[in-house]
Image (spheres, helix red, strand yellow):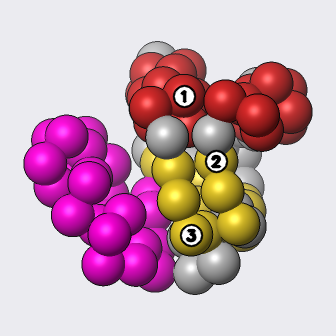
Amino acid sequence: GDNQQITITMTLTAAEADQARQFLDTVTGTVVLDFTDLAYISSAGLGILIALHHRLAATGDKVRCRNLNRNVGELFRIAGFSMIFDIE
């Protein structure tokens, strides 16, 4: 599919998890997630991103993450997500 850019805003926590999962389950092709406006991501949010990665990787597509703030970038590094996702 075509590359799609999706902007993730505010927080991605258990409260937003169902809505985010429902939306991201419809995404196909390589996806660029823009985290410019993301303040916080919880373990529930991280789980959604991993599920998206696994689903897209099965068809040869990727999840690219861009504009991570310092805290989110550090979390991705510690969790090993920098080895899983393309970080721009």
Residue 46: in sight, yes or no? yes
Cα separation, mark 2 vs mark 1, equals 8 Å
The residue to which callout 2 is attached is 12
User: SS of the residue at dot 2?
Assistant: strand
Examine the rendered structure and indicate whether residue 86 appears above or below residue 34. above
Say which of 4 and 84 sits in front: 84
User: SS of the residue at dot 1?
Assistant: helix
In the image: residue 25, left or right of residue 65: right
Cα separation, mark 3 vs mark 2, equals 8 Å
Type of amino acid at the residue the image marks with label 3: Ala
User: What is the magenta range?
Assistant: 64-88
User: SS of the residue at dot 3?
Assistant: strand
**Callout 2 crowding tier (Cα within 10 Å): few <14, some 14–19, many ≥20:** many
Say which of 38 and 4 sits in front: 38
Residue 61: in sight, yes or no? no
Disc nearer the start of the sequence (2/1): 2
Q: Residue at x 60, y 69 (%)?
A: 38
The image quadrant where one finds the C terminus is bottom left
Across and down, in percent, residue 5 comes to 69, 67
* Pointers 2 and 1 in contact (C-beta within 8 Å): yes
Examine the rendered structure and indicate whether residue 61 appears above or below residue 18. below
Q: Which mark is residue 44?
A: 1
Across and down, in percent, residue 44 comes to 54, 28
Disc nearer the start of the sequence (3/2): 2
Type of amino acid at the residue the image marks with label 1: Ala
Residue 26, by quadrant, is top right
Examine the rendered structure and indicate whether residue 88 appears above or below residue 45. below
Across and down, in percent, residue 24 comes to 74, 36
In reply to whether residue 25 is colored magenta, the answer given is no
Q: Which mark is residue 39?
A: 3
